[in-house]
Amino acid sequence: MNTEEIVIGDVEKFSIVDYPEHMAAVVFMQGCPWRCPFCYNTSLQKIGAEPESDWTFSKLMNLLERRKGVLDAVVFSGGEPLVQGEALESAIDVVKALGYKVGLHTGGYRPEILERIVEKIDWVGLDIKAPFEVEKYKMATGGYTLVENVKKSLEILAASGKHFECRTTCDPRILTIEDIYKIAESLKEAGVQEYYLQKYRPIPTDKTTTDEQCLALVENQALVMYLQKTFPKFEVRK
């Protein structure tokens, strides 16, 4: 596929938080099949939409050429990068040829694409939206029911030997303490080594959820102690 067909919603030119221990540029790929109630990147959701930015792949390459020796990695985020599967693979090939490490942020939407590109990727952040139950995933994603796709993506990463983490945004409108325990058990069984809880920050339209409610999930002492014992690497991101 011609890399100029890649649709880029935006680019963050410099980040120290999107790829562990590396300085990275973050490429926000346009398009996402999900409508998570806690999403802050709603402008990236529409698939096939014209991006609001003027970023093209050529412009991205110019940036990366100039930043050699300054940046370590390029992270493909979204939206959901696996929506543009074939274009994503082409972009990864070009970026790797420049000498950059490649990271991926994904919800595990298309395991068949992930399986094809996983050997080219150096690190993955896998978002686990809810326990692997259809009704819970529907709530957390605005209607997605193919939970087996997410589980398959997790299996692919666990078998790949690649560095990856799992993380869950703790939206108290959707998840309970028991839900987090269920997620943790599933991840433990899959052999996950790194798991992170992310505090929910109310989106602009959420006028009712309090900070106390947001903290209740991530500061539950019994839960935090359990997760610390369960995963070699665990922390709460606030």
Image (tube, helix red, strand yellow):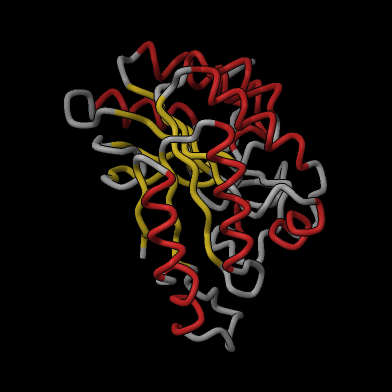
Q: Position of residue 51 (x, y in %)?
A: 59, 47
What number of labels is visible? 0
Most foreground residue, 124 or 5: 124
Question: Residue reaching furthest left?
Answer: 69
- Against 178, residue 17 (above or below) is above
Quadrant for the N terminus, please.
top right
Q: Front-most of 119 and 99?
A: 119
Q: Is residue 97 left or right of residue 80?
A: left
Q: Nearer the viewer, residue 100 or 206?
A: 206
Q: Residue at x 81, y 51 (%)?
A: 134
> Is 194 left, or right, of 110 in this rendering?
left
Residue 187: x percent and y percent? 56, 40
What is the x, y in percent for residue 76? 48, 35
Query: In the figure, is residue 150 to the left or right of 15?
Result: right
Which residue lies at the image location 50% right of the left edge and 41% below the top edge? 77
Tell me where residue 221 sits by quadrant.
Answer: bottom left
Which residue: 63% across, 61% down? 179
Give percent across and percent down for residue 121. Answer: 46, 21
